[in-house]
Amino acid sequence: MSNPLAAASLTGKRALVTGSSRGIGADTAQYLAEAGASVVINYRNKEARAVKLADQLRAAGGTALTVGADLTDPASVQAMFGTVATEWGGLDILVLNASGGMESGMAEDYAMQLNRDAQVNVLNAALPLLAEGGRVVFVTSHQAHFIRTTPTMPEYEAVALSKRAGEDALRELIPALTEKGVEFVVVSGDMIEGTITATLLNRLNPGAIDARKEAAGKLYNVSEFAAEVASAVVDPVPADHTRLVGDVSSFEPVAE
């Protein structure tokens, strides 16, 4: 897929994409790097993938760092931003892409820890580094964004509720961001074909993704949705701070 930022220049901009060793995060990081941004590839335990991606970006003429961090560990998050401060002196773009909650073997409240508490902590930790004119992008799903008005499949409900709680908590920080001259936008999309979440959901509820695809008419793949996330870095921010990607006719509106 062609880079949606082909006509934009991010030369001199510094970006960090959480959870960017693979999937949507990796493709988003690649789009930003191709547009000239220096990019931090953040990972939790996929170091080899993160290093491979960073090497690819550098080979193409880009600038990239790899920084491991467990986003649910405040000390790990502080260390990550300490590295960014040392290496680059600040940030212009923060893409909050990392999420989860369907993994096996995690604590009962892990979804809320990662999708709400960690998101807020990451943004608060990044705030001193974010430069005026910067942009924060939070990545979510329609199933989470609209969970207050439209039920989702039972297997995804806990994750959806935690991601919506995270979105709400981040929105409360908009005044602090605005005071610094930093913009905030939520990017919400339907289920994305090829993601870990879609695979796990289909395993728990066989046929769920096909059914959602039939209802929506089309589901974005990883590269297509990442292009929308990357575009949200440069496009004007909607008045409600929300960029809805793809069909939303199956979802009841929610007041922000």
Image (cartoon, rainbow, N blue to C red):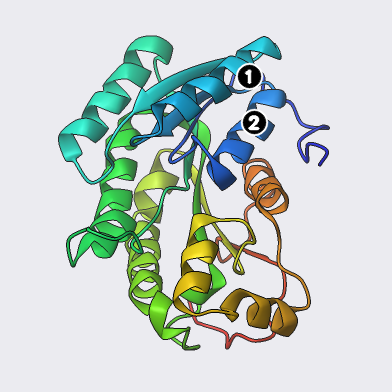
Looking at marks 2 and 1 on the same chain, the residue that comes earlier in the sequence is marked by 2
The reply to whether residue 76 is in sight is yes
Give amino acid for label 2.
Gln
Judging from the image, what secondary structure is the residue with disc 1 in?
helix
- Please report the residue visible at 63 percent of the width from the left and 19 percent of the height from the top: 57
The reply to whether residue 145 is in sight is no
The answer for how far apart the CA atoms under marks 2 and 1 are is 7 Å
**Mark 2 touches mark 1? (CB < 8 Å):** yes
Circle 1 residues within 10 Å: few <14, some 14–19, many ≥20: many
What percent of the width, then of the height, locates residue 21? 49, 34
- Please report the residue visible at 38 percent of the width from the left and 65 percent of the height from the top: 163
Residue 53 figure quarter? top right
What percent of the width, then of the height, locates residue 24? 58, 46
From what the image shows, is residue 95 above or below residue 110? above
Residue 234 figure quarter? top right
Name the residue tied to disc 2: 30
- Please report the residue visible at 27 percent of the width from the left and 38 percent of the height from the top: 70
Name the residue tied to disc 1: 57
Left or right of 11, for residue 70: left
Asked whether 34 or 120 is in front, the reply is: 34
**Label annotation for residue 240:** none
Asked whether 184 or 14 is in front, the reply is: 14
From what the image shows, is residue 237 above or below residue 206? above
- Please report the residue visible at 61 percent of the width from the left and 39 percent of the height from the top: 28
Judging from the image, what secondary structure is the residue with disc 2 in?
helix
Left or right of 141, for residue 235: right
Circle 2 residues within 10 Å: few <14, some 14–19, many ≥20: many
What percent of the width, then of the height, locates residue 180? 41, 38
Residue 87 figure quarter? top left
Asked whether 179 or 118 is in front, the reply is: 118
Give amino acid for label 1.
Leu
